[in-house]
Image (cartoon, grey):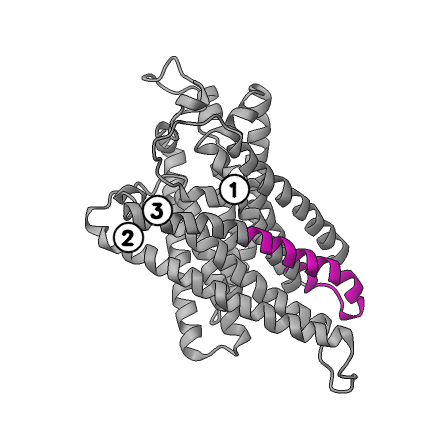
Amino acid sequence: MSNSSQTSNSPLLPRSNADGPRGWRDVLENKMTWAWYTSIMSSGGIALILYDLPYGFHSLWIIGMRIIYIASLVGFALLLATHLVRFMVNPRLISASITHPSEGLFVSTFAAALGILIVDGATYAEKMHTAHGIALRVSFWIFLVVSVIFGVGTPLAQFSKAPQGERVRPFQLSKLVTVLPLTLVGYAAATVAAHISTNDHHIAMPILYMGIAFQGMGILVSLLSLSNFVDRLYQYSLPSISQRPSMYVAVGPPAFSALSFALLAEQCLRHFPAEKTAPGGATDIVGGVALYYILLTFSLMFWGLSLWFFLISTFSNLAALGVMDIGVQQLQMFALIFPNVGFALATIELSRLFGHPKVLAIISEVFSLTVVGAWGIVALATVYGVLSGRIFRNV
């Protein structure tokens, strides 16, 4: 089937036994898609939420570390091995999956999952006092290269597809996923910089600067797609009821940018502190304070934008709740959990920077636990779908 005639829900390869049972090769080629990495992204994000809860307790980070994070690592390794087998069995699936109108949008989730696992590892290593600075710095630079390759290459592959005609096609918010790794670079940079001694600010500087630069790249490119999405809402009204939950994808880029800029602001101030005994004209001190307030302002702005998209998405879904029939066993539901993970983490971080005002701390705690509960439902439904084979029967 050519790209020009391929629908977003069609399998990558035509099947001669479309009405019969699916064999292992059919499942491997058409069902083990790039979208599976959304489960790793969301699970890794949940581990971070359990670590950062304002009113969390010791057992939560143990659950996050020893169960969810380890399971995410194992899952990532298994998925990577599965995809290597998938592409070795049929090499032409590499180009077919990248340019597919549906699966191709999720190629970048591999890089995003890698970034979240790096942040997870750095975060829990600090808690266990086993952080290895050199390994973390190398991991960051590897992730930076991978995120640029996927954040630029995936959209380019979609741009290069054959035109599908002049008809108006519904806007897919999943297009935002193609640049998602770039919106996590700042998060990874700040997390790694937190493990660098203040005496080694010359090592931290390139990491922080690259984090700011590529975080800016990710959010600005995302804003172009978000403006298109809002314009289509004005022109064509809300998406169909079945597509309404996908509106939450819009929350992700500004939410993770708010989180990243808040953490980067903190690290800039840490590595270039404003000491009372230092001359007021020292470049590093003035620069650190200036960057702190600039980045904190960006963080608040993008948090406000993510809140707007969250409220629009929530009320739009509540309006259709009575007639909504969404199969939570669908793998793409993980992609809807992940943006809300970012919003929860950003809210927790801003609450912490402002000294945990009671109202904001309680709101962030309740919302975070709600996201954890939603992830639990989707995770259990996905496990059931895998064990029963139901998730492999649905195209």
Closest to the observer: 262 or 88?
262
Residue at mark 2? 317
The numbered mark at residue 162 is: none
Circle 1 sits in a helix, a strand or a loop, which is it? Answer: helix
Above or below: residue 142 compared with residue 259: above
In front: label 3 or label 1 = 3
- Rounded to the nearest angstrom, the CA distance separating label 2 from label 1 is 24 Å
Earlier-in-chain disc, 3 versus 1: 1
Q: Are marks 3 and 2 in contact (CB under 8 Å)?
A: no
Counting from the top left corner in percent of width and height, residue 150 is at 59, 40
Amino acid beneath label 2: Asn
Above or below: residue 37 compared with residue 346: above
Residue at mark 1? 178
Circle 3 sits in a helix, a strand or a loop, which is it? Answer: helix
Residue range in magenta is 191-219
Counting from the top left corner in percent of width and height, residue 322 is at 19, 50
Closest to the observer: 5 or 28?
5
Q: Which residue lies at the image location 56% right of the left edge and 26% below the top edge?
A: 94
Q: Do the residues labelled 2 and 1 touch (CB within 8 Å)?
A: no
- Rounded to the nearest angstrom, the CA distance separating label 3 from label 1 is 20 Å
Residue at mark 3? 232
* Whether residue 120 can be seen here: no
Q: Which residue lies at the image location 48% right of the left edge and 37% below the top edge?
A: 105
Closest to the observer: 246 or 137?
246
Amino acid beneath label 3: Arg
Counting from the top left corner in percent of width and height, residue 177 is at 49, 44
Asked if residue 146 lies left or right of residue 6, the reply is: right
In front: label 2 or label 1 = 1
Amino acid beneath label 1: Thr
Counting from the top left corner in percent of width and height, residue 149 is at 63, 40
Earlier-in-chain disc, 2 versus 1: 1
